Amino acid sequence: MKSFRLARLLLVGLVILLTLMPVGGAWATPPEHSTYQLEWEAMEWVDCGDFWVLEDAVVDVRATNFYDQDGNWIRTQEHWTLNGFVYNLEDPTHWLPENPTHFTVTYDEAGGQTWVGRLIAIPLPGQGIIWEGAGIQVWDSDWNLTFWAGPNDWIEGDTDALCAALE
């Protein structure tokens, strides 16, 4: 009975001690937050043979920089919200809106990037999404795709529906 009480007392003491001890992460440099906006016009996007598909877009970005306990940068994580449209360079009256998309981009210490979420979605009225990029993409520091999973018409080179819709 005495050993049971002693064990219980030790357990309670350990719980109190662990509760009062600061967590290792609490000693790290706090993350920095920022927001900014990207805009691009007439960005060459897809080669349809007889014409180029260009993109105009506005991207709202919420960024967080993470640091270790010595204040050294570890990674940056950005949450992107993209709004835009694509069009035929030869005949800009042929255009399609992009559904607003939300995705996360993480930049690592090695210079690589990981993109997660729905990067692009172009609907054609009455037919649904005809061009999509979603899932995960991992790029190395030289901008080589090292891994991807999920539907991605751009990576797979499936341009037929998009090009036909903008002819």
Image (cartoon, helix red, strand yellow):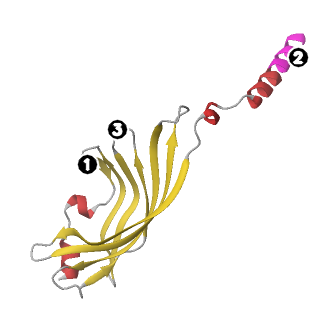
Mark 2 or mark 1, whichever is nearer to me: 1
Question: Is 146 situated above or below 50?
Answer: above
Question: Is 5 situated above or below 114?
Answer: above
Q: Which of marks 3 and 1 is nearer the N terminus?
A: 3
> Residue under circle 1?
143
- SS for callout 1: loop
Q: What stretch is highlighted in magenta?
A: 1-10
Amino acid type shown at disc 1:
Trp
State the CA–CA distance, disc 2 to disc 1.
Answer: 62 Å
> Residue under circle 2?
5
State the CA–CA distance, disc 3 to disc 1.
Answer: 12 Å
State the CA–CA distance, disc 3 to disc 2.
Answer: 53 Å
Mark number, residue 110: 3
| Magenta portion: prevailing SS class | helix
The reply, left or right, for residue 90 in relation to residue 36 is left
Question: Is 30 situated above or below 53?
Answer: above
Residue sitting nearer the eye, 24 or 41:
41
Cβ–Cβ below 8 Å for labels 3 and 1? Answer: no
Amino acid type shown at disc 2:
Arg
Find residue 59 and report its horizontal and vertical position in percent.
41, 67
Amino acid type shown at disc 3:
Ala
The part of the image, by quadrant, that contains residue 122 is: bottom left
Which quadrant of the figure contains the C terminus?
bottom left
The part of the image, by quadrant, that contains residue 42 is: bottom left
Find residue 119 and report its horizontal and vertical position in percent.
37, 63
